[in-house]
Image (tube, rainbow, N blue to C red):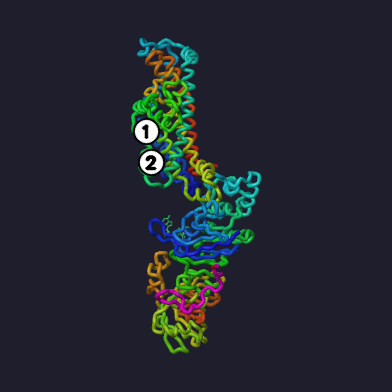
């Protein structure tokens, strides 16, 4: 059990790829920190550096306060679940799980019951005598988990350990992983692509992009106060609707224009308001979460800030409906089209896209059909504003107040 | 191993006739005839290979077995029907002191060679698996022993191990490891060791190349996982790397065995079987028996000892290679 801290950790590969740049992170004892980010953003590289499998180009990694930059993987006392399992192909499930005990000289009659216990927890009881080649992808992944669980390491490192499981098993395993981690009280660094997993598991979540930390905060904080456009678009499913906008109007009555539509902003006196006021006439990006949109009923429509939209598709999910709509506002996406990619390193590449689309998450009892022209009421208090050049959130004075600061 | 991921998929059905399963009686009849047609084609393709095998392998073996039961001399060797000798040649062989020691020498020589070749070959293979400057050059130098004709190798080694002025003695005396030059090839107690050392040198490239390519197949992350699990380098080698490449090791040993028991040129070049038959092997002694003493029968009988060894090895080889196939396809339970 130990704390884990990374200070200014940078990795430049021999081929010149800078996979991780000046990364800072502090993980408390017993804390579960999730790393999320798109493919190729350096998550695995980061984990490998913590494990001692990859040398740092610069920076410091501490385990329990001790600098471990030059400590070999073998002596770091970390457990790691590899993205592609890395099971021992010649050993059966039991021996795979018990391997770490074996090399520590634990005799067979002691290590096998322990391994069997881990196998039971992971639902591998029926296959303990099989070799990895005879297991399904999900079973292999659980063996890889078992190998980490059977140890009592200083730090848990997990690289997308649940990505190959079916939905039910994944939900079940999430809580199992958390339970074991809580029981051992060990710091955990958990990599995932899946933002639902990140949000449900992480005490805090670190969002990475192109090797740099975008934001480190609690899931709630990340969702409500994304530090920039990237985090805003990455966290949340369906993702935040992002439009090109412009602020106009008088100081006490600012108006946001999205295409031809105008939304009156509430009068505030805060920092954000002042920044918006100062930026009148300049392009910015406005973000509206799908749940901050509701379908107006005829009478109230005039008094509220509404977006007129054409319904293109309605997804009925039972407990909610996802209404896909189009407006004449210019939707914002990055220039590679669609998904954020690691090569888009700066924030300045946002270009307008003509196909204006958006999603609203509404009450399934509200009758809406494809082809309807609806007025969507916008919860104007909850609109997010981003600088169109830098992508930074406008008016975010104190980012991530919940994040424990590193000891200096 | 990534390739094991698809282990569960069954082998592709080999009907090749395009008939839907569960078709009518006539359909399955057609399918049968199609299959047998295919089988016929298969045999036709195999015919040249089978003819070659019969000529190149079966014929000499059968002839050798026949010879060992005949009383042959220079005058009868050319004809088919030499006088029948029963087991005479075999009793003669087992009463022949030199033949007996040749069998023992062959055993010692083979075990010693294989052990040395494996240890050195594996060490080199492990060395070449690491990155270091000049790795590619060093790796290609490993096959040098194969570029030299065996008989030349024998002569070179004879020079190197000479008592007076031989390179080995000069080095050993020079570094103070020994005081007086050793007569490596002239002393009965050293000669077999010397010949074995030369043969190890010859076999190292084979072991190195096979083991090296096997090592490349060991996934880096599996070794890393072992490292994280706390295994030291020796444990990683013993508990992870070697077990993973074990199928290749087994086959390398088997082939190495077959190559080693029939070594001939090297010994002829270095010692000619001497001194006092101290390096006489099955191969060299049966050669001497047959072509210098014209005792064809006993020579053949002695050679059949090798044949028996080969007969044991061949099925073993098939078993192991099938086993390896099964293991790597992940179909074994
Ligand atoms: N050994 C290496 N040599 C050179 N470049 C590398 C090496 N390993 C990774 N990279 C590069 O570093 C970047 C980060 O890779 P990394 O594997 O850490 O991404 P990741 O976030 O784990 O992606 P994924 O989610 O797809 O697993 C990528 O651009 C990758 O191509
Ligand atoms: Mg990865």
Q: Is mark 2 on a helix, strand or loop?
A: helix
Give coordinates of residue A304: x percent, y percent: 50, 85
Q: What residue did someone put label 2 on?
A: B139
Q: Residues within 10 Å of mark 2 (few under 14, many from 20)?
A: some
Q: Is mark 1 on a helix, strand or loop?
A: helix
- For marks 1 and 2, the one nearer the N-term is 2
Give coordinates of residue A67: x percent, y percent: 53, 59
User: Vertical placement of B268 versus A162: above or below?
Assistant: above
**Which chain's residue wears label 2?**
B
User: Of B262 and A367, which appears nearest the observer?
Assistant: B262
Give coordinates of residue B227: x percent, y percent: 52, 49
Q: Is the magenta stretch mostly helix, strand or loop?
A: loop
Q: Does mark 1 have its CB less than 8 Å from ligand 1?
A: no
Give coordinates of residue B302: x percent, y percent: 45, 18
User: Vertical placement of A276 versus B18: above or below?
Assistant: below
The magenta-colored residue range is A385-407
One can see residue B52 in this view: no
Q: Residue at x 36, y 10 (%)?
A: B75
């Amino acid at each position: 059990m130990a704390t884990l801290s990374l200070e200014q950790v940078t990795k430049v590969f021999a081929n010149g790829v800078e996979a991780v740049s000046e990364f800072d992170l502090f993980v408390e004892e017993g804390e579960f920190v999730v790393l999320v980010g798109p493919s190729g953003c350096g998550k695995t590289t980061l984990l490998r550096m913590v494990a001692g499998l990859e040398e740092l180009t610069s920076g410091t990694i501490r385990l329990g306060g001790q600098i471990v930059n030059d400590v070999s993987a073998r002596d770091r006392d970390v457990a790691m679940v590899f993205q592609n399992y890395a099971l021992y192909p010649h050993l059966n499930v039991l021996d795979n799980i018990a391997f770490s005990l074996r090399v520590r000289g634990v005799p067979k009659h002691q290590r096998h019951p322990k391994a069997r216990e881990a196998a039971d927890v992971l639902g591998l009881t029926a296959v303990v005598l099989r070799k990895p080649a005879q297991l399904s992808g999900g079973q292999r992944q659980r063996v890889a988990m078992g190998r980490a669980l059977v140890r009592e390491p200083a730090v848990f490192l997990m690289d997308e350990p649940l990505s190959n499981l079916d939905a039910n098993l994944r939900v079940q395993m999430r809580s199992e992983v958390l339970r074991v981690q809580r029981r051992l009280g060990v710091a955990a660094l958990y990599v995932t692509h899946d933002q639902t997993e990140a949000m449900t598991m992480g005490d805090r979540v670190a969002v990475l992009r192109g090797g740099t930390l975008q934001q480190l905060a609690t899931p709630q904080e990340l969702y409500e106060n994304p530090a920039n456009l990237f985090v805003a678009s990455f966290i949340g499913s369906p993702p935040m609707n992002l439009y090109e906008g412009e602020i106009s109007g008088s100081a006490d009555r600012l108006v946001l224009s999205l295409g031809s539509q105008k939304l009156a902003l509430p009068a505030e006196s805060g920092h954000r308001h002042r920044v918006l006021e100062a930026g009148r006439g300049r392009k910015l990006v406005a973000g509206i979460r799908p749940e901050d949109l509701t379908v107006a009923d005829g009478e109230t429509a005039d008094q509220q800030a509404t977006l007129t939209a054409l319904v293109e598709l309605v997804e009925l999910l039972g407990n909610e409906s996802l209404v896909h709509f189009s407006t004449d506002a210019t939707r914002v996406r990055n220039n590679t089209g669609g998904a954020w990619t690691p090569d888009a390193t700066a924030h300045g590449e946002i270009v307008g896209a003509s196909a204006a689309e958006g999603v609203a998450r509404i009450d399934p009892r509200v009758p809406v059909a494809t082809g309807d022209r609806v007025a969507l009421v916008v919860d104007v208090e909850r609109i997010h504003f981003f600088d169109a050049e830098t992508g930074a959130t406008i008016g975010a004075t104190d980012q991530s107040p919940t994040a424990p600061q590193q000891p200096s | 191993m990534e390739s094991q991921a698809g282990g569960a998929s069954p082998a592709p059905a080999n009907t090749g006739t395009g008939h839907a399963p569960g078709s009518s009686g006539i359909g399955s009849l057609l399918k049968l005839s199609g299959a047998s047609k295919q089988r016929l084609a298969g045999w036709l393709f195999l015919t040249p290979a089978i003819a070659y095998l019969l000529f190149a392998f079966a014929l000499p073996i059968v002839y050798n077995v026949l010879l060992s039961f005949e009383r042959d001399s220079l005058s009868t060797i050319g004809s088919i029907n030499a006088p029948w000798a029963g087991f005479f040649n075999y009793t003669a062989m087992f009463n022949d002191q030199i033949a007996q020691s040749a069998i023992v020498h062959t055993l010692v020589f083979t075990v010693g060679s294989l052990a040395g070749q494996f240890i050195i070959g594996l060490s080199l293979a492990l060395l070449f698996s690491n990155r270091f400057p000049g790795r590619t050059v060093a790796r290609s130098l490993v096959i040098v022993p194969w570029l030299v004709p065996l008989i030349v190798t024998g002569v070179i080694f004879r020079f190197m191990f000479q008592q007076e002025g031989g390179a080995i003695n000069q080095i050993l005396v020079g570094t103070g490891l020994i005081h007086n030059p050793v007569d490596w090839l002239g002393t009965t107690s050293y000669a077999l060791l010397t010949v074995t050392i030369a043969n190890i040198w010859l076999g190292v490239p084979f072991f190195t190349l096979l083991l090296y390519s096997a090592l490349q197949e060991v996934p880096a992350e599996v070794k890393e996982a072992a490292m994280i699990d706390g295994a030291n380098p020796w444990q990683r080698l013993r508990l992870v790397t070697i077990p993973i490449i074990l199928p290749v090791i087994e086959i390398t040993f088997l082939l190495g065995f077959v190559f080693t028991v029939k070594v001939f040129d090297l010994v002829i070049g270095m010692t000619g079987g001497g001194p006092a038959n101290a390096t006489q092997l099955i191969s060299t002694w049966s050669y001497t028996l047959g072509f210098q003493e014209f005792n064809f029968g006993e020579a053949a009988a002695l050679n059949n000892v090798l044949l028996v060894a080969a007969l044991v090895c061949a099925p073993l080889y098939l078993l192991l290679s099938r086993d390896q196939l099964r293991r790597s396809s992940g179909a074994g339970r």
